[in-house]
Image: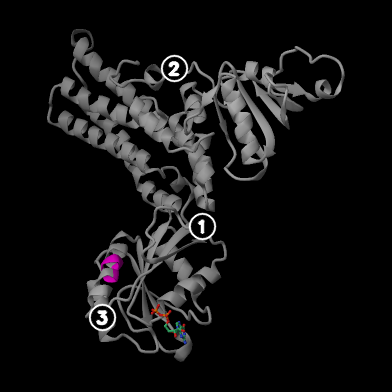
Amino acid sequence: MGNYGASTASRNLPSLGDTIAAIATPPGEGGIGVIRVSGALAFPIAERIFERASEASAKQPPSKAAFESHRIYFGAIRDPCTGEMLDRALLLTFRAPHSYTGEDVVEFSCHGSPFLLQRVLKLIWREGARPAQPGEFTQRAFLNGKLDLAQAEAVADLVRARTESQLRAALYLHEGLLSRAVRPLNEELLALLAEVEATIDFSDEIGELDREAFACRLHRLIRQLTELLQRAQSGRLLREGVRVAIVGRPNVGKSSLLNALLAEERAIVTPIPGTTRDLIEEAFQIQGVPIVALDTAGLREDPDPVEQLGIERTRRAIEHADLLLVVLDLSEGLTDADRALLATLPAGKPRILVWNKADLVPEEMPLPSLPAIAVRVSSLRGDGLPALCEAILQGVNLSGVGEESLLLTHQRHVQAVEEARQYLQSAWQANQADLPPDIIVVDLRAAWIALGTITGETVDEELVNRIFRDFCIGK
Ligand code: GDP
């Protein structure tokens, strides 16, 4: 069944012949630094440059016995041409196919000096390896069938995870949970495709397409894809973080609120790279869910030109936010300026009214009634913050969200499922309209190709290259 139009990855991708080497640990000084070598020359290079400890110290000539697989050797890295010792190090050995890449792999655990590591790496290159491209080790693992594409992407996610939910999503993906959910759907799709094709090629023997039965099976597939997509929205938020914009007129306590939230949720993570620095932005977690909060510039009615710029940014931040925290001053109540501001906020954008400065009014004072979730807080004293945190999760439907939402967290995977569903819907319509099977087959095949890009069953070279170029060198 390999001839359905998609090129399989292993057919089109670059040859695996050469041996690659790179530093696998991060740049800078460290306790140890690891150099990874993969390919046919990995063991011959190790044999030339690595001297086992007993040989290094004893007077007898070095043993010529080959390194065994899955062993750790202690010894010296030596330039075979000059005899100079570069480091005392550990050598880890993995013979194909039982290695990360599926090829022969050796790893040198050296002392973690960038200068030392560069010298060892250059020696390994001189001995016949070439510099590895970003993600090339994992790409080889994919091409050699050690991992499917979604699992390979999980490797990059694991390395980058900054919060509990990102880490869990990465681990699930790496374990193959998404692949296992998608594969049966793809198999059913392939079976359908084969059946419809058979009615085209052998209609004399097997008769016409049973359109009712076909519609039924197609409908089930569409429903399963739709269920996957419904979970995707919360999956994206869990993985990428919930973008919360803090809005309100000047002096209601926006900055104080942000600081209070940061103090409340101590597990602060580093800011997500690539996000705007124009507005004050802080990242933290609520129950393991990453939150990116923006403190927007004050929204005024009559801005001068300089402020206009800040207001434009605020508008954009509001547009891109998943949730708005509208801060109001409880000691002043709902002012005309608040009403005007509320009127400008995009309808349909989830929002929470945060009545701040609760410490200035009697506890029993009721909140002004407005149609939105409202929370009473004092940023000064920290009152009401746990309730606000719970409301934030509720506001984006993440309160008590199950682990199963972490299945579909990559935009690429979501797009693949969406595309497959669209093609299946189009096939369904064609079937309802009694269009000929060869028209239906075109949609089925396109759906199969789209869905197969998740695991990499159907994927082209360009996409694979793009995915792995996102990795770091040495991974
Ligand atoms: P922003 O302009 O909306 O960012 O407001 P700020 O956070 O700068 O706060 C404006 C003023 O209100 C400051 O003097 C804060 O100390 C004060 N403030 C903020 N939150 C509270 C609160 O919960 N209670 C009281 N009493 N004062 C507050």
Q: Confirm whether residue 209 shows in the render.
A: yes
Q: Which residues are magenta?
A: 310-314
**Residue where numbered disc 2 is placed:** 15
Rounded to the nearest angstrom, the CA distance separating label 3 from label 1 is 35 Å
Nearer to us in this view, 254 or 177: 254
The amino acid type found where label 2 is placed reads Ser
Vertical comparison of 171 with 267: above or below? above
Above or below, comparing residue 305 to residue 275 in the picture = below
Q: Position of residue 249 (x, y in %)?
A: 32, 79
Q: How is the image coloured?
A: one colour
Residue to which mark 1 is pinned? 270
Question: x, y percentage for residue 59?
Answer: 87, 18
Q: Circle 3: is it few (<14), some (14-19), or many (20+) Cα within 10 Å?
A: few
Left or right, 135 with reference to 249 = right
Q: Position of residue 200 (x, y in %)?
A: 19, 14
Residue 339 is marked as 3
For marks 3 and 2, give the CA distance.
65 Å
Q: Residue at x 52, y 53 (%)?
A: 163
Judge the density around disc 1: few (<14), some (14-19), many (≥20) Cα neighbours within 10 Å.
few
Examine the structure image and report whether residue 397 is included in the region drawn in magenta.
no
Q: What is the quadrant of residue 68 in the picture? A: top right
Marks 2 and 1: CB-CB under 8 Å? no
Q: CA distance from mark 2 to mark 1?
A: 39 Å
Give residue 381's position: percent from left, percent from top. Answer: 53, 82
Q: Earlier in the sequence, mark 2 or mark 1?
A: 2
Q: Secondary structure at mark 3?
A: helix
Mark 3 residue type: Arg
Left or right? Give the position of 442 relative to 144: left
What quarter of the picture does the N terminus occupy? top left
